[in-house]
Amino acid sequence: MPVAMATAESDSRLIERVGRGDRDAFEQLYRRFARPVLAMAVRQLGDHGRAEDAAQETFAAVWRSARSYRSERGSASAWLYAVARHAIIDRARQRREQAAEIPDEASADAGPDQRAEESWLTWRVHAALEQLPERERAVIELAYWSGLSQAEIASYLDVPLGTVKTRTRTGLARLSGLLDEVRE
């Protein structure tokens, strides 16, 4: 029997074993085909990093779909290279990532510590609002979250404007007391 035929049968058996979840067979298949698949990807993509990603996706797809391999349809290597071709095409379709540039100045955006502090403060304000009586909370939420004027709130709630002003003043005073620890 010719050597090429023995190799093809061996590759075929390896893929069938991979289809049954045999990790040793997968490692052998990987050792045989990793370099040629990577070389193929580098030639077609022109970028070593993206080619490595395509090669990795190729072998992940081999692991997932080895059960679908049928030796009567063609050689094992042809099947594996077809899987690689699909992974390379998918990688080529993805938008190239922009190279990161070092900024000239530090970002004015909040850092992780500042965002965490703001998040905690937001949570604390919402928790304090939940402790207010419903009438005061409704007026404050309509004013600060919905952006309504006191006259619009009075109309919306169907209460006198003076009542809205009183509830706002009382609610803000209670809220201030509940948030004393935040200011310290």
Image (cartoon, rainbow, N blue to C red):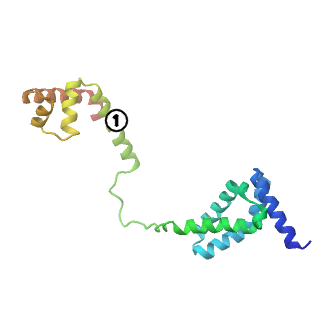
**x, y percentage for residue 167?**
15, 27
Amino acid type indicated by mark 1? Trp
Rendered residue at 77%/50% (across/down): 20
Q: Say whether residue 3 is left or right of residue 22.
A: right
- Seen as rendered, the residue at the extreme front is 72
Q: Say whether residue 65 is left or right of residue 138.
A: right
- Seen as rendered, the residue at the extreme right is 1
Figure quadrant of the N terminus: bottom right
**x, y percentage for residue 136?**
19, 27
Q: Can residue 84 be seen in this view?
A: yes
- Seen as rendered, the residue at the extreme top is 133
Say above or below: 4 vs 156. below
Q: Say whether residue 91 is left or right of residue 77.
A: left
Res 183 → quadrant: top left
**x, y percentage for residue 2?**
90, 73
Label 1: how many Cα within 10 Å (few below 14, some 14–19, many 20+): few
Q: Can residue 184 be seen in this view?
A: no
Rendered residue at 21%/30% (across/down): 138
Res 139 → quadrant: top left
Rendered residue at 66%/73% (across/down): 40
Res 36 → quadrant: bottom right
Residue that carries the numbered disc 1 in the rendered image: 123
Figure quadrant of the C terminus: top left
The kind of secondary structure element at disc 1 is: helix
**x, y percentage for residue 44?**
60, 75
